[in-house]
Every structure is written in C-alpha cells, then in structure tokens.
Amino acid sequence: MERAPRIIILGDGTAGLNLANKLRKLLSVDDAFITIVGNSHRHYYKGDGFLIPFGYKKPSESYKPIDFLLSPKIEHVRDEITGIRIKDRTVLTRKKTLNYDFLVIATGARLAYDKVPGYLGEAKHFYDFEHSMELRGILDQFKGGTIVVGTCQANVPCAPSVFEFSILLDQYLREKGLRDKASIKYIYPQEKVFPIDEMVPVMEKLLRDSEIEIETGFEVDSIIQKNHEIHSKSGKSINYDLLVLVPPHMGQNFIAESGLENVDNFVTVDKNKLTPPEHDEIFVIGDAANLPIPKAGSAAWMQAEYVAKEISRRVGKIMVGSEYEGDVGCTLYTGNGTGLTIYFNYSKRPKVSKPRRFDYLLKKMESDAYFSVIARGMI
C-alpha cells in the first residue's frame, strides 16, 4: 500500500490556518498527512488592529487559542522555520527536518523597522496586537497637537486600514471633544490617496469632509526623533506630535536563502497557479506571495480555497481543476456608522458604492464571522 502524501504548510497565521482546515475537510487522514508549522499559541485577527486603539473593539474579542481553531486531525509543529531545501523536498526548523510531497508557504510578512532610520522608539502603528494596545494607551492620554498618519509602502497587508484609521481618528477626537485641538495629516507614498483608482474620489472626499489634510507623493525616507520630523525621499518634511506610521513589510528571511525567485522576500509565483517557476509541488498564498493584487485577508482565504482544491485534485479526490482568478473583497469603515464594500479580480475592475449602514454592520461582524467559520475553513 502506498503511503499517503505529506502536505506541509509553513505559517500558522490567517492563510495557513484557513488552508489547513480546508484541506482536512477535503482529505481524510488516510488521504494525506497534514502538518502546519508555526510558533503561535493564540491567533489574532489583524483586521481589528485599527479599532482597538479607539476602544471600538474589546481586545479579548480579537484573538482565540489556535488549538481551538485548528482541526485536531492536523499536526501542529510549534517551531521556528529556518530553511527550505527544495532539491531534497525538506523543511528545516530549529528542532526538526520535515519531508514533504506538497509544500505551501503561508508565512506572511514581517515588519521591517530597520528600513526607516529613526522609526524604532518613535513611530507607532496598529499592525500587531501589542502595538495596537500601546497606541490605545497613547490616544487615551492625547490632549491635542498634530497627528500624522501614513504608510511607508502602498501594498501593505490590509492597505485600506490606514485610511480607515484616519477617518475613525477624526470621529474619535470629536467624541472626546478634542477635534478643535488637533490636526490630522494623511500621508501616502503614491501621487494619489490609494492605489485603486476607483476608490480615490470616494476616499479623497471622505478625508476632506473630515478636515484631514492630504499629502500624497510622500515616500518616507527617515524620521528625525529629536525634532519630531518625518522626511520624504524628495526632501519634504512634516512635523508631528504623534506619528502613526505603518512600517515597511518584507517576506521572511529564509525565503531569500531558499533559492526561490522573490521580491523583498515575497515569493514570485504564477498568478493563476500560485506556484513558483518550475516547482509545481510548491504553492505560496497570503501575504507571502508576490501577486498583482492587494495583500488582504479575503485574498488569502480565496487563495486557500483554490490551493485546497488543487492539492485534493492531485491526490485524486477532486476531478475538476481550475485556475486562481485573483479575487479580492473588502469592506471598509467610512465613519459615522457607514461602510462600503468593493470586490474585484484580475479581469474585473471594482465597483464602488456610496457609504451605507449595511456595509458598516457587515464590517462590524467581520471578526465574529472570521473566528466562527472562516478561520475554521468552513467557507
């Protein structure tokens, strides 16, 4: 009797967890061994990151024990990934060497603070739980001044959150009676306020209606801490009292050493197959992939759906194959109890509706839906 193929998933974050659970629903324990590798003990929903600083989300509602979400029929190796030996089809961790028949890289992105001189110890952000909580304490004590909000890169995970944070910051300061004592400046590295053209007019109007100053084309170069100044690569500088800046993102260090083609350690893949050149036994999903679409949770879930079915097809449990079409869906907060939803893929441009109450309620339920069904691979 032939042994069952071994599927190894690197990364126990959003993309890896979702894929592991989807695969286990499609493949029995006799069909395949499924191993997920990562160091997490609790799973944090990053989509809540920009809500926690305002007290709009209880921190305890934004994470769950990973063992609570992961199917018990999946092996969870808690260890640090140190390398991939493609020729040998092995993964190296601090403690083990693991063999694979199929490998899925879902290791997300890391925060590369060192890319911006002066960042550490000065700029704040909401891109992980600890820093969201830190920013919550800072905003709670804020009495007035200039707040600069921006990002070092356009295509960061959850890219709309920079805009959403700015809009909700205006709302939060008004609720506290501090808006007339504060100015908000929105800086962006591109010459427009957001990479998706269809969103630009809507976002610009909402920012201006909220009396938020806009500075586009501001590619962050450095931060001068003693002067409370942020400098751009073109020589512009802006003073601040509080700087909320999404740091640069890069892929994991071991990617560069693996021999896989990459850009900033994000693996280059076929956009329809999610496989690197000449390695159809390897898939890359979520933020770890270098794709011509935004790095978003919804994109990761849809990529996991495609890969789960493709691996199942190759194992012989699904007969019909398909191609990944680049689907992305996103619901944004637009302030004052409204939101808007956009959906697009490689071939369909997004349609943008006016902000409405329904989308706000949809967004408000997002983390509950995530923990209840999405992370568990049920949809």
Image (cartoon, rainbow, N blue to C red):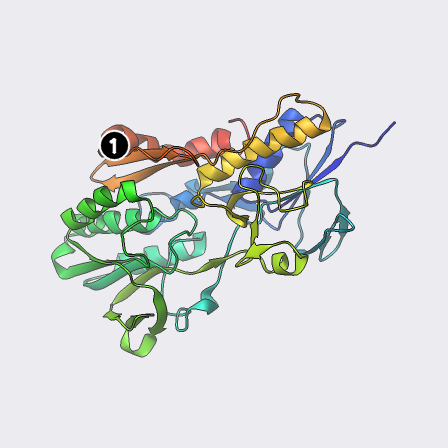
Q: Residue at x 30, y 57 (%)?
A: 188
In the rendered image, residue 41, in percent from the top left (x then y), is placed at 58, 47
Q: Nearer the viewer, residue 98 or 70?
A: 98
Answer yes or no: is residue 284 visible.
Answer: yes
Residue for badge 1? 353
Give the residue at the far top of this rendering. Answer: 319
Q: In the depicted view, which residue is nearer to us: 99 or 365? A: 99
235 vs 272, left or right, is: left
**Residue located at (16% from left, 49% from top):** 210
**In which quadrant of the rendered image does the N terminus lie?**
top right
Image coordinates of residue 67 in percent, x first then y, are 60, 39
Left or right for 74, reference 96: left
Type of the residue with mark 1? Ser
x 22%, y 33%: residue: 354
Q: Tell me if residue 198 comes above or below residue 120 in the rendering.
A: above
**Outermost bottom residue:** 226
Taking 11 as reference, is 231 above or below it?
A: below
Quarter of the rendering containing residue 153: bottom left
Please identify the quarter of the rendering in which residue 312 is found. top right
Name the side, left or right, on which 209 lies relative to 252. left
Give neighbour class at mark 1: few <14, some 14-19, many 20+ (Cα, 10 Å): few
Nearest the eye: 158 or 136: 158
User: Which sits in the foreground, 250 or 322?
Assistant: 322
**Residue 259 left/right relative to 188:** right
In the picture as drawn, the residue positioned furthest to the left comes out as 180
| Residue 65 in sight from this viewpoint | no
Extreme-right residue of the structure:
1
* Quadrant housing residue 16: top right
Secondary element under disc 1, as helix, strand or loop, is loop
- Residue 307 at what x, y percent from top left? 60, 34
Is 271 located above or below residue 22 in the figure? below
